[in-house]
Amino acid sequence: MSKALKIGYARVSTQDQNLDLQINALKKEGCDRIFEEKASGGQRDRPELERALDMIREDDTLVVWKLDRLARSTRIVIDTIEKLKAKNAHFHSITEKIDTSTAMGKFFYTVMGALGELEKSLIIERTQAGLAAAKAKGKLLGRPVEVSIDKLQDARALLKDPDRTVKQAAKTLRIAPSTLYRHMKSYGGREGFVQEKPIEAPDKKNIKP
């Protein structure tokens, strides 16, 4: 059986910032490989993070100097943790002393999973509240002709749950299933749609609802 690896990930937000502090800490932690990135923490398209995640196998550990170096977006943190958990890999943040290979550290996975479920519930509640407000104002509640980026992002979050069907997600968001299927097709189907690629405005992909 091959040795479990520690894969380091260091990130700063701008090109003029220095990565030395993080890299030194990751080397001291014994990382076998370190991926370096200069990109905003809220940016989803981060090639070096994707390379690090692609390299990780079962029992390997993704190591960061600090949790906000992984991402400043809660959604990105949750999605990254879910990817590691699906691979039976671990996560370690040096500063916060988070280590999911330990009994206490496994609680972090539980919290992240709960936050993911909370986000999905909030999406549903927000959609229902919007429909109720529209109904109260006497607006027609037919399906919208256009699908916004926000609604596509909500659909992506809902469809990360493998037990939720496309029809169920479409119904929750008041999108015609056929419309959602067409958008998903442009990303290579459901599997491609739920990946962490930036969602573009529908008109950029020449998709008609």
Image: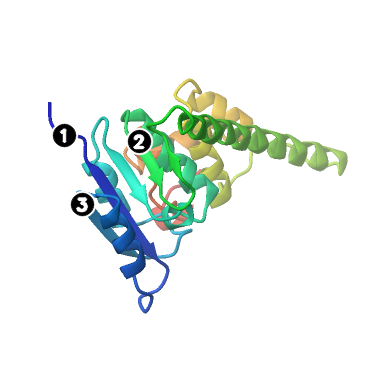
Q: Which mark is residue 90?
A: 2
Q: Please, what secondary structure does the residue beneath circle 1 have?
A: loop
Q: Where residue 63 sits in the image (x, y, percent)?
A: 34, 48
Other-residue count near label 1 (Cα within 10 Å), few / some / many at <14 / 14–19 / ≥20: few
In front of the other: 60 or 197: 60
97, above or below 141, in the image: below
Residue 87 in view (yes/no): yes
Kindly identify which residue carries mark 1: 3
Identify the residue shown where x is 33% and y is 59%. 25
Q: Please, what secondary structure does the residue beneath circle 2 have?
A: strand
User: In the rendered structure, which amino acid carries the disc numbered 3?
Assistant: Arg
Kindly identify which residue carries mark 3: 33
Do tag 3 and tag 1 residues touch (Cβ < 8 Å)?
no
Identify the residue shown where x is 57% and y is 49%. 150
17, above or below 34, in the image: below
The residues bearing labels 2 and 1 have C-alpha atoms spaced at a distance of 14 Å
User: In the rendered structure, which amino acid carries the disc numbered 1?
Assistant: Lys
Identify the residue shown where x is 52% and y is 45%. 75
Q: Where residue 136 sits in the image (x, y, percent)?
A: 87, 39
User: In the rendered structure, which amino acid carries the disc numbered 2?
Assistant: His
Instruction: Indicate which disc, 3 or 2, sits on the residue closer to the N terminus.
Output: 3
Determine the residue located farthest toward the left in the rendered image. 1
